[in-house]
Amino acid sequence: MKIISIKENSDFKRLYYRGKSVVKKRIVLYYRKNRFNYNRLGITVSSKVGNAVVRNRIRRLIRENYRLFELNQGYDIVIVARTAAAFSNFSEIGLDLKKALMETEIKKDEKCFNKDYNAL
């Protein structure tokens, strides 16, 4: 499944101000219903988190973790990496993302997570 990205600054700002949020140790998840029948994902990593190599690694880890989840369609989602994400591995970021999604209406049900994540 192809991940459709949020690229416009106005879309990011709309989510920050009008969307709901869930805060975890490594990430902050903002979400809001959109008018499409598919999800759009935006990932932001501040330059305070690390150099370009570290920031791109965090983006890849978040994108791959997101890809493994089966979610309800029709949401804009922005994931903001916190500084603790710079020192985290794939499963730690995945666990935070799973916990954040469990608090939202985006997840389909308890079985929406890949079997690998049910062990976490």
Image: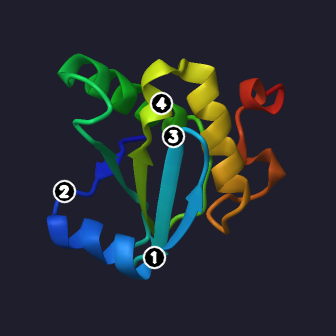
* 42 on left or right of 33: left
The residue wearing badge 3 is 66
Gap between marks 4 and 3, in whole Å?
15 Å
Q: Which label sits in the foreground, 3 or 1? A: 1
Q: Quadrant of the N terminus?
A: top left
* Residue 63 in sight in this render: yes
Q: Nearer the viewer, residue 115 or 87?
A: 87
The residue wearing badge 2 is 7
Position in image of residue 43 (x %, y %): 34, 46
Q: Which picture quadrant has residue 82?
A: top left
Q: Nearer the viewer, residue 80 or 4?
A: 80
Mark 1 residue element: loop
Mark 1, Cα crowd under 10 Å, few <14 / some 14-19 / many 20+, is: some
Gap between marks 2 and 1, in whole Å?
17 Å
Query: Upstream in the sequence, badge 3 or badge 2?
Result: 2
* Residue 74 in sight in this render: no
Mark 3 residue element: helix
Amino acid at circle 2: Lys
> Measured along the vertical axis of the image, is residue 96 above or below residue 14?
above
The residue wearing badge 4 is 85
Mark 4 residue element: helix
Q: Quadrant of the C terminus?
A: top right
Position in image of residue 13 (x %, y %): 26, 72
Query: Upstream in the sequence, badge 2 or badge 4?
Result: 2
* 10 on left or right of 113: left
Q: Which label sits in the foreground, 4 or 1? A: 4
Gap between marks 3 and 2, in whole Å?
17 Å
Q: Which label sits in the foreground, 2 or 4? A: 4
Gap between marks 3 and 1, in whole Å?
19 Å
Amino acid at circle 4: Ala
Amino acid at circle 3: Tyr
The residue wearing badge 1 is 19
